[in-house]
Image (tube, rainbow, N blue to C red):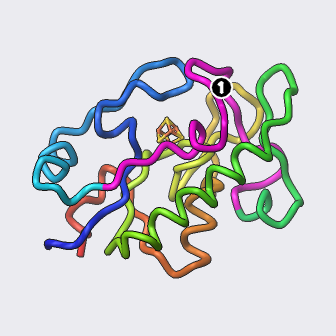
Amino acid sequence: MTSKVLVSACLLGQPVRYDARSNANTRLMEIQREGRVVPVCPEVAGGLAVPRPAAEIVGGDGNDVLDGNATVQTADGIDVTKAFIDGAHHALRLAQRHGVAAVVLKARSPSCGNHAIYDGSHSGVLTAGEGVTTALLRRHGILVLNEDELDQLP
Ligand code: SF4
């Protein structure tokens, strides 16, 4: 595989998570050293700070957010929906500009999750669904994997 891959910046060791930590992944950092990685943190690209209050999707998943039927909120009820949508569009533009073969995003994030997300109760409960960025990328036909699915990279 020689084509480029868009990857969650936190998986590449960048401390951009809400708590200013990372989720460094050795295999993805190897691929980055080969010059094949385009990093992105949708939440930072959308204008959110590091650190920032944790946010969850309330009322659905990323598809519902894109359709205007759900919101993204912090535990204190601050609505950060626009930043999440802006960040998703930034990631889409990057993926399209670089013609990436696939995207690898951090599992369970309200932006990046591809199978499960937290349920909006801010109590650590997961539910089936995908994050806002994953939903937008998939609507444009882009393969979105998580860090445990690297064997599926084309
Ligand atoms: Fe940024 Fe996605 Fe990582 Fe969250 S999971 S820190 S939005 S790259």
Residue at x 63% of width, y 60% of height: 89
Q: Position of residue 47 (x, y in %)?
A: 66, 36
| Residue 148 appearing in the image | yes
Is residue 53 magenta-colored?
Answer: yes
Q: Position of residue 25 (x, y in %)?
A: 24, 38
| Residue 128 appearing in the image | no
Q: Is mark 1 within 8 Å of ligand 1?
A: no
Is residue 49 magenta-colored?
Answer: yes
Q: Dot 1 surroundings within 10 Å: few (below 14), some, or many (20 or more)?
A: some
In the image, residue 142 above or below residue 110: below
Q: Which residues are magenta?
A: 38-62
Residue at x 64% of width, y 21% of height: 52
In the image, residue 19 above or below residue 154: above
Q: Position of residue 107 (x, y in %)?
A: 45, 46
Identify the residue at the far front of this view: 97
- The quarter of the displayed image where residue 4 is located: bottom left
Q: Amino acid at mark 1?
A: Ala
- The quarter of the displayed image where residue 23 is located: top left
- Quick check: 30 left or right of 83? left
- Quick check: 3 left or right of 84? left
Q: On the image, numbered disc 1 is attached to which residue? A: 54
Secondary structure state at the residue bearing disc 1: loop
Q: Nearer the viewer, residue 49 or 115?
A: 49
